[in-house]
Amino acid sequence: MTGSGPGRVDRAWETVVGLEVHCELRTETKLFCACKNAFGDEPNTNVCPVCLGLPGSLPVLNAFAVELAMRIGTALGCEVRRSSFHRKNYFYPDMPKDYQISQYDEPINVGGGLDLPDGSRVGIVRAHIEEDTGKTVHQGESGRIHGADYALVDYNRAGVPLVEIVSEPDIRSATQARAYVTELRAVLVATGASDGRMEEGSLRVDANVSVRPRGATAYGTRCEIKNLNSLRSLGRAIEHEAARQIALLEAAGTVVQETRHWDEEAGRTVPLRSKEEAFDYRYFPEPDLVPLVPDADWQARAAGDVGLLPAARRARLVELVAASAAPTPQQTDQVHVVVAQGLDELVVAAARAGAPAELALVRAANELAANLDAALRIEAGAFASLVTMESEGALTPTQSKAVLAEMLAAGGDPAAIAAAKGFEALSEDSLSGAVREVVEAHPDEWARFVAGEEKLAGFFTGHVMRATGGKADGKAVAAELRRLRPSP
Ligand code: ADP
Ligand code: MG
Ligand code: ZN
């Protein structure tokens, strides 16, 4: 082996990756019926004759799904054009109709590309509309396919609108693949097309992986790894699959084109089906749907709703938190997190309301991002008030986090919550009074502190905190101690 292990750049071989990303659209209802599009509902409650494919039912295309698809196409610089629907036929228990309606030879979005933060660009082949399948849940001790006692099927997901974004084979490493999905996810969140939740299956990735000798122009034979639902799995699967192919080729073997499954626990890919076993989908035009021809007005409206893309959103935050200086590496990370989670508008609103943007960014990247569901419902004005109270010293950081936790749990006004918690700010007088009392009560420690034993600052702060029931601000206590200490 020539260093083809995970995470290492191989000197002799180049990895080539093309990704197919399935994105569930954030619509109220499914693609062809009025059933609710929701994650986590009681199984088989959001179903009707249309999404179950009962005889005589007819699909009606969801206009908002089309609009979101056009937003995605616009954001990725695709040509948005006339499209049509086909039936993709295959038998699978989680697909009640025995066919999936998908755009085939006339997809709505064609061409385009995505620029990554590292400066590289990944071409987009197409981004088409299709419907999701249901979900098979394997029951048994292992919870996985192998060793399951039986399987149950939930059709709530059947018919949920998807856009499948197919990249060119422009990706050259697991790291770049992760960066691509991270940026694409941010685009999908920024445009409002997706909630971006990989852990709920809102984004699912198939990775096509091949290897070729460095310097070669022709592509190697690829394998397709299905259904990767985390960035970690995506990265690991690509690294292991590339290493497997390299080992095979170095042992004078050949790579067989096939579909493989990523076994997270075993840390390897295993064959699902070979090219010979591939489904023959017998595509034919969906007879119950007319071609989709969005007029110029509709296209312009969708394009107008795309809004700021992630790169511009990040630049806007950087401008707010570090207008004159360069942002710290920590701030850069925070900016990425906040934009990726769709929390940047809250920070911008807080800054516009007069709160310091730096502190708003910190609270958004930490406390808000850790409780995203609630954070996306929080009132911008209330968040701005909280940040202002903390920055003005009316709340200590610890108190501020406690108030924010309460706002996230139950909503409400930060000042009222702070008052209810007894977080009225210590006046300057009572703070310095408390510090003085503690100093007077511990003359020996104070003498050592004055003599330069810095670690005793913590001792005094602790005592002041206890004396004030945690209401004192640590920074203010430190400042008061410094003020009292005679300068050498
Ligand atoms: P299919 O229709 O069989 O899925 P496509 O030509 O549409 O095949 O390609 C699907 C995906 O595979 C695309 O993302 C493309 O970039 C990627 N791909 C194609 N050839 C290769 C290759 N040799 N190595 C890695 N990825 C590839
Ligand atoms: Mg494919
Ligand atoms: Zn339905």
Image (cartoon, rainbow, N blue to C red):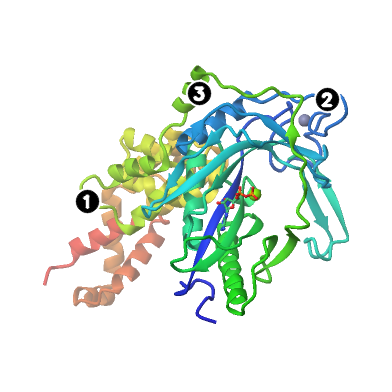
Circle 3/circle 2 CB separation < 8 Å: no
Q: What percent of the width, then of the height, locates residue 169?
A: 52, 54
Mark identifier at residue 325: 1
What separation in Å lies between label 3 and label 2 (alpha carbons)?
A: 29 Å
Task: Tell me the amino acid under the disc marked 2.
Answer: Ser
Task: Tell me the amino acid under the disc marked 3.
Answer: Gln
- The secondary element bearing badge 3 is classed as helix
> Few, some or many C-alpha atoms within 10 Å of disc 3 (few <14, some 14-19, many ≥20)?
some
Task: Tell me the amino acid under the disc marked 1.
Answer: Ala
Circle 1/circle 3 CB separation < 8 Å: no
Q: Relative to 382, is 372 on the left or the right?
A: right
Residue depicted at x 47% and y 74%: 12
- Vertical side of 403 occupied by 450: above or below: below
Q: Relative to 469, is 166 on the left or the right?
A: right
Q: What percent of the width, then of the height, locates residue 442?
A: 30, 72
Tell me the residue that label 3 is attached to. Answer: 299
Q: Nearer the viewer, residue 323 or 483?
A: 323
Q: Can see residue 318?
A: yes
- Vertical side of 251 occupied by 375: above or below: above
Q: What percent of the width, then of the height, locates residue 32?
A: 72, 28
Between discs 1 and 3, the one toward the N terminus:
3
Tell me the residue that label 2 is attached to. Answer: 57
> Few, some or many C-alpha atoms within 10 Å of disc 1 (few <14, some 14-19, many ≥20)?
few
Q: Nearer the viewer, residue 219 or 210?
A: 219
Residue depicted at x 39% and y 55%: 333
Between discs 3 and 2, the one toward the N terminus:
2
Between discs 2 and 1, the one toward the N terminus:
2
What separation in Å lies between label 1 and label 3 (alpha carbons)?
A: 40 Å
Q: What percent of the width, then of the height, locates residue 70?
A: 53, 30
Residue depicted at x 42% and y 56%: 469
What separation in Å lies between label 2 and label 1 (alpha carbons)?
A: 62 Å
Task: Indicate which label's residue lies in the foreground, 2 or 1.
Answer: 2
